[in-house]
Image (tube, rainbow, N blue to C red):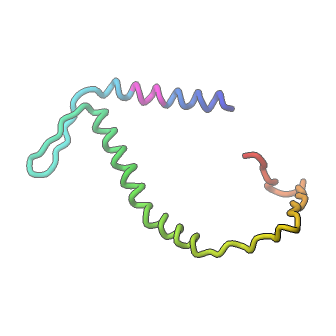
């Protein structure tokens, strides 16, 4: 399975590399008031991708703060006394279950 994962990654890398080689001509981005930015097409695409990623992260920050505040408010469970050992309950797997648990994934 790892072989196919690395094969897929190599395919994506070479596809993007070929895209970059095929788009080396200059592109111009026209801003307001007659401003213009001229750069190779791959830099324009890379800048747009980077700005999109940054915008997505910044847009998620309020939600992360909200979940962080909620998690901080939750009181932790009482700790077990040190004189009593902690014993894990045995687990049973139902062979007729529709979706059995998948350990190790």
- Residues 89 and 85: in front is 85
Does the magenta run of residues contain 17?
yes
Which range is magenta? 13-18
Q: Main secondary structure of the magenta part?
A: helix
Direction front: furthest residue: 83
Locate residue 18, reporting x and y percent. Answer: 40, 25
Residue at 86% in and 63% down = 86
Residue at 36% in and 44% down = 49
Residue at 32% in and 39% down = 45
Name the side, left or right, on which 87 lies relative to 16: right
Locate residue 30, reporting x and y percent. Answer: 16, 44
Image-quadrant location for residue 95: bottom right
- Residues 87 and 90: in front is 87
Image-quadrant location for residue 1: top right
Does the magenta run of residues contain 77?
no
Looking at the image, how many numbered discs can be counted on the residues? 0
Name the side, left or right, on which 46 lies relative to 6: left
Locate residue 25, reporting x and y percent. Answer: 24, 27
Locate residue 92, reporting x and y percent. Answer: 90, 57
Direction left: furthest residue: 34
């Amino acid at each position: 399975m790892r072989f196919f994962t690395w094969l897929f990654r190599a395919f994506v890398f070479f596809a993007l590399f070929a895209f970059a080689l095929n788009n080396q001509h200059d592109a111009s981005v026209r801003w307001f008031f007659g401003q213009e930015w001229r750069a190779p097409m791959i830099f324009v695409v890379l800048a747009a991708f980077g700005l999109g990623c940054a915008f997505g992260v910044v847009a998620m920050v309020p939600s992360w703060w909200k979940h962080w505040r909620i998690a901080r408010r939750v009181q932790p469970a009482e700790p077990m006394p040190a004189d009593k050992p902690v014993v894990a309950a045995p687990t049973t797997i139902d062979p007729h279950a529709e979706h059995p648990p998948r350990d190790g994934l």
